[in-house]
Amino acid sequence: MSFPYFFANSWQRLTWFVCFNRRSYELMERLFKVYVYKEGEPRLVHKGPLTGIYSSEGRFIHEMNQNSRFVTHDPQEAHMFFLPYSVAHMVLDLYVPGSHSMLPLATFIKDYVNLIASKHPFWNLTRGSDHFFASCHDWGPATARDHPELRKNSVKVVCNSDLTEEFVPDKDASLPETYLHAVKLPTKLGGPGPSKRPILAFFAGQMHGRVRPALIKHWKDRGDPDMRIYEVLPPDVARRTSYVQHMKSSKFCICAMGFEVNSPRIVESIYYDCVPVLIADNFVLPFSDVLNWGSFSLTVSEKDVPRLKELLLAVSEDRYRKMQSRLKKVRKHFLWHDSAERFDMFHMILHSVWTRRLQQMDAIIGHETSMV
């Protein structure tokens, strides 16, 4: 039975599953099938980085290439089609250093999609609306620029989920950014309770973008022991207290945008039970259609950086304890595994794609019904 036919004849029964709950997830597990295109050079199209700041991109591509539960080898069974190219690897192999030009990457992707469209009928049937790609590189969304249908119609699963950069929340999906330092995944996660966290707020990182310089201007070198705000963690400080130890000793971890809205500190904060403080206007948070971020994190407007300590102190002890306890519950959704496990990062990303497909079909069926 084809996917459109199935949805057209049972849509009222399925519409309420769009909200994330166990039934929605289980419906995805029972039904959802993805076809992964086999075309492309292995380095650029079927492999991505498994470590480093773009590891979410590589891990997802890797899992899609080996998954047997959701991946189908029969495209006629597919509900969605995955374009398994890696923007991070393209930057390494195609970008001309110092050129400041994305043209080689955009051209490669345009040619790749055109190759897919010429060899298979599926792209042309929907103009790419049931296709998706995943990228954690800052340039991910922009590299689709030279293929109008890819840019406008396809589902972009990207870390750079910025409303000002053509990210459409009802169509696209926000990909959590994880910085994995080794192929072996971290296991010593969690952290102490509030009473054993003497630091109010912690941040350390490279100075780029518009928010971090403001953070440093207002909070660095103020002699305030509550506010441990650094640029790169100084060697003498790091020798006494490592980056991770700072996170485990802090009540709030500042997740300030850099060049782009996303930051690996969000996931790191969740890993170590340090309540994330999100400072990035126009950022669509990962899984925000299914997770209530306000229950386990704070969002601070960029203009309110000078009031940061005031806003943090306004959080009551009871509210903070509840927020931290919820971090422990949502952590499973931000974990990668060597082999994907239920409700983990891979499954949550796939669930985001699944719900976008449901919304597409809802819109199509609603339009067709209105024309009757």
Image: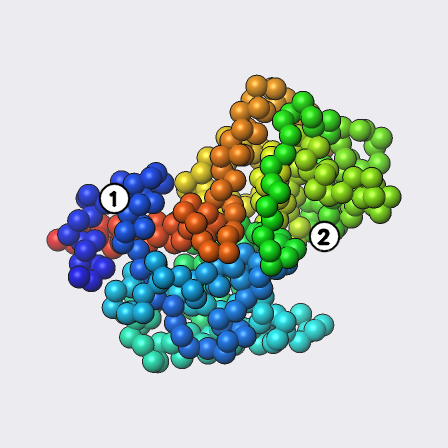
The image position of residue 100, as x and y in percent, is 67, 70
The image position of residue 183, as x and y in percent, is 60, 59
In this rendering, is residue 332 above or below 116? above
Q: Quadrant of the N terminus?
A: bottom left
What residue is at 29 percent from the left and 75 percent from the top? Answer: 121
**Residue 240 left/right relative to 159:** right
Q: Which residue is mark 2?
A: 208
Report the amino acid beneath label 2: His
Observer-nearest residue: 6 or 284?
A: 6
The colour style of the image is rainbow
**Residue 184 placement: quadrant:** bottom right
**Residue 304 left/right relative to 293:** right
Task: Of the two numbered discs 1 and 2 on the same chain, state the one appearing first in sequence.
Answer: 1
The image position of residue 251, as x and y in percent, is 66, 30
The image position of residue 210, as x and y in percent, is 69, 48
SS at mark 2? loop
In this rendering, is residue 264 above or below 310? below
What residue is at 35 percent from the left and 76 percent from the top? Answer: 117
What residue is at 60 percent from the left and 37 percent from the top? Answer: 190
Report the amino acid beneath label 1: Thr
Most extreme residue toward the left is 372
Categorize mark 2 by other alpha carbons within 10 Å: few (<14), some (14-19), many (20+). Answer: few
Q: Which residue is mark 1?
A: 15
**Residue 137 placement: quadrant:** bottom right
